[in-house]
Image (cartoon, grey):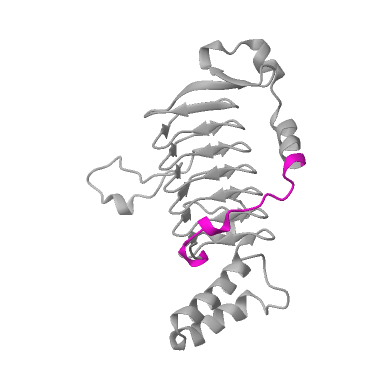
Amino acid sequence: MAGAAPGWPGRALARRLYRVLGAGLGVRARTRLSALLIRQRLALGAGSYLGRGVQILGRAHVRIGSNSVIGAGSWLNVNHRGAGAMSIVVGDNCFIGRDNFFSSGRQIVIGDYCLTTVGCRFICSTHVADNPRLPVLATGTTAGDAIAVGANCFFGAGATVMGAVSIGHGSVVGAGSLVLADIAPFSIAVGNPARVIKRFSFSRDAWLAADAVGEADLAANPSEEQYLAMLRAAAPQLPMPWIAAGAEMGSF
């Protein structure tokens, strides 16, 4: 699903059509009409695609970059919707796997070229549970935390990032890991809670044990801007594995 279709009559008419026609349409036709409405309400970059069953709450505060995929069954939830603020941002050339969950407090930003696999979670807003005399469902959600993920990070199946966390560019988070603290660029982190076990040295062109990386190694590593330039030169328009977006893409 790309950005808004040329000539589409606009979101107000789309809503009216959906209300008037939706009840009388079959499932497939209703889904397609709903998809057109989503295009009008979501900042969706050129060539990007939302898998079947993706739910976005607070669409006006979500931006998906170009040539990116949100896998089937994923849920992007904007808990606090300030005027004009973008609370969930997914960059260009990203693949967000199936059944991912985003719960934004202040903001969640996923950098360009990131890859998440099935069941990953990014949670920086949770229900307030301070007073057991009140139903948790009625006490609201937290708003202060933000998650920032740098360019070209990879998250294994079931990885979770929680709280106010920054993950540096070029990092890998292992399957099932729980990230509760910042991770430096070019790191491999695993475990619950996640800990950094390796870091990459560009000067030595190798992943090294975390305690074997020195100041000279870190000084030679590229900044995120330099790293993005390298990635864009290598893959300006990344071929997307569309087949993995959802069952609607078929099997082979």
Residue 246 colored in magenta in the image: yes
Q: Residue at x 64, y 11 (%)?
A: 215
State left or right for residue 79 relative to residue 201. Answer: left
Q: Which residues are magenta?
A: 233-249
Q: Is residue 87 visible?
A: no
Residue 66 occupies quadrant: bottom right
* Residue 140 screen position, x and y as percent: 38, 50
> Which one is nearer the viewer's eye here, 137 or 73?
73
Query: In the image, residue 209 lies at what x, y percent?
Result: 52, 16
Which residue lies most toward the front here? 252
Q: Is residue 114 visible?
A: yes
Is 206 magenta? The answer is: no
Q: Nearer the viewer, residue 241 or 80?
A: 241
Q: Is 34 placed left or right of 205 in the picture?
A: left
Residue placed most toward the observer, 110 or 87: 110
Q: Quadrant of residue 186?
A: top right
Count of numbered badges drawn on the protein: 0
| Residue 162 image position (x, y, % from top left) | 43, 37
Relative to 186, residue 214 above or below: above
Residue 192 x/y as whole percent: 36, 29
